[in-house]
Image: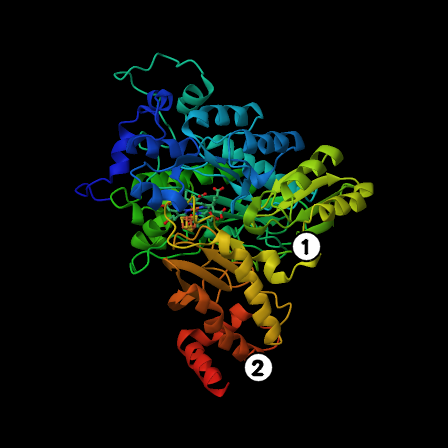
Amino acid sequence: MSDQKKLSAVEKVKAESRGLRGALAEELAAPGPSVSEESYQLLKFHGTYEQHDRDTATLRKQQGQEKDYQFMVRVRMPGGVLSGPQYLVLDALADRYGNGTLRVTTRGGIQFHGVIKRDLKATIREINRALLTTQCACGDVVRNVTTTPAPRRDARHRRLLEDARLLSERLLPASRAYHEIFLDEAAQAALGQATEPEPEPLYGPTYLPRKFKIGLALPEDNTIDVLTNDLAFIGLTDGGLREDGLTDGGLRGGETLTAYIVAVGGGLGMTHNKPDTYPRLATPITVIPAEDLLSMAEAVIKVQRDFGDRGDRRHARLKYLLDRQGIGWFRDTLAQYWGRPLAPPPPLPRLELPEILGWHAQGDGRFWYGVPVPAGRIQDTEEVRLRSALRAIVAEFGADPVMTPQQDVLLSNLPEEAREPVEALLRAHGVRLARDLTPLARFALACPALPTCGLALTEAERIRAPLVAAFEAMLAAEGLEGLPLILRLTGCPNGCARPYNAEIGIVGRMPGHYAVFVGGDRAGTRLGFKLFDKVAEADLIPRLTPLFRAYRTRRAAGEGFGGFCARLGPEALLALAEEVSAAA
Ligand code: SRM
Ligand code: SF4
């Protein structure tokens, strides 16, 4: 970054925060429902966002009342793994301090919504008492590390989870601010305003220029959408890495995970009408022995720390550094930071999206049962008492839940004899099982958007169910019933439900209107493109119907909808849609 460039305001907040402390302790103890802008920024590093109920904001303003402030609290749990008892603690906290729901996130975390400031500290303390944390669930640091959630009890999956945990723990900041502020750990050396905070050997005093995401996947299971991370590791099993650093194609056969392909520069956030912001999938840059995972992660983080853009937060992610400086520069610089030359990257193996819902053998005599959670919202409604059902299964059958980046829950470690009663219990609570759902409904994602997300331009989670139903009806009418289709919906272009590498991505554009992206693939390895802009919610299905009509008659053998769109490209696709509409 050029020295002349002005630093963004958040850089100043970080620099002056004395290791992420700022005035947090005082502000959290003070009366009043909200915090200052500085504290708002610092709280992210500790896993919480100040939000307000956007449904009531206008009315409250008209009535001269202040906003209904509340906090979102995000639990950072690598690989989405919880023990049964931990899950029960979180479930109870949802009632005690939250809005009665648990929200499975697209990175396999759990969020609470609706926590008021007075309860924030207690909420975070209780989460820690269950040996979980919210530290660095958000902020300009390494976030929740994702990995293949399927609880297959073999050596490669064990290694992946161990490695996700290793990165998660070892890439935490050195600052004890979190423990002092939320867990009442005594400040080590009465950190007064004048005292220097503890040094941060990895991050430095201003942490990273922006959020930093790491994911680990296997070629046969890309449930996490690994290429959307700043830093992606794709595990290769024995035989996968030759001495010269190239793969020999024997990627699947072996049991032992011996190497990782390293890919960098994934990230999806963009801003409408700003073409210099864009979604990007990670580019493979090298392959490393699995033992070098941590040192490689640290080296990539340091390059981003030292060269990432600290002037403009819209350009601060690693993807922009990579594109600005070029892959050659990045590889050379990374090699210097890593202290060794980089092996050339092997071709990326084909990545797949497996079905992990329903019953599966774990390989150790036990089973997991994947339960679909629409938009990740674990709640009880009048018709569907999903939260009660999951709580009962965990309590009665000893299941250990795994949260997936597809916003679902895998109930692991169930014995054979639990299979029938677990299904019966879910049905008795009105829960729709995976096999009752269309492939579309099984995989559709939606971000929270309104009313909690401060950045939402439109609805997302709250219109997921009617939108999926409308798609299902349209597909049935077009003779495409049961078509596997990856649909993802977000309330703004930040891309939290990963719409840009889906077959159809519906992205909030302005109130009541969406941009429509098409052309991604099932496994999340191809970016789509924008086909329509500013489509009213009610017009989404009518606008897309001609495309499906054209797809039915013109698709190549075995071609998915995303592949069909990608093959034709925007111009031909629009022309075809017009032709089909005119003929109808
Ligand atoms: Fe996200 C900001 C929710 C995964 C890209 N995201 C937000 C905030 C915190 C809004 C804010 O800044 O005020 C949202 C809180 C809404 C709420 O009410 O809860 C929010 N993001 C989510 C979650 C809960 C969506 C979900 O449906 O589950 C996901 C939490 C994951 C977790 O446990 O850590 C979530 N966000 C993602 C992903 C997907 C992923 O990581 O696999 C992305 C796209 C990948 C990426 O990072 O590029 C994503 N979120 C963003 C961005 C755009 C970042 C950028 O580089 O431009 C923002 C806005 C920002 O950072 O300024 C954002
Ligand atoms: Fe909010 Fe936008 Fe993310 Fe949806 S995509 S949660 S609206 S920031």
In this rendering, the count of numbered labels is 2
Point out residue 372 in the picture as x, y percentages from the top left corner. 63, 50
Under mark 1, the amino acid is Ala
Q: Would you name the residue on which mark 2 appears?
A: 553
Please tell me the numbered disc located at residue 475: none
Residue holding disc 1: 434
Quarter of the figure with residue 385:
top right
Q: Amino acid at mark 2?
A: Thr
Percent of width and height locating residue 21: 34, 24
Q: CA distance from mark 1 to mark 2?
A: 29 Å
The answer to whether residue 319 of the structure is visible from this angle is: yes
Residue drawn where x is 42% and y is 25% of the image: 118
Q: Quadrant of residue 557?
A: bottom right
Give residue 143's position: percent from left, percent from top: 45, 39
Circle 1 SS class: helix
Q: What's the residue at 49%, 27% (across, down)?
A: 124
Pick the quarter of the image with the N terminus: top left
Q: Is residue 539 above or below residue 45?
A: below
Nearest the eye: 269 or 93 = 93
Q: Residue at x 49, y 48 (%)?
A: 232
Task: State whether label 1 is within 8 Å of ligand 1.
Answer: no
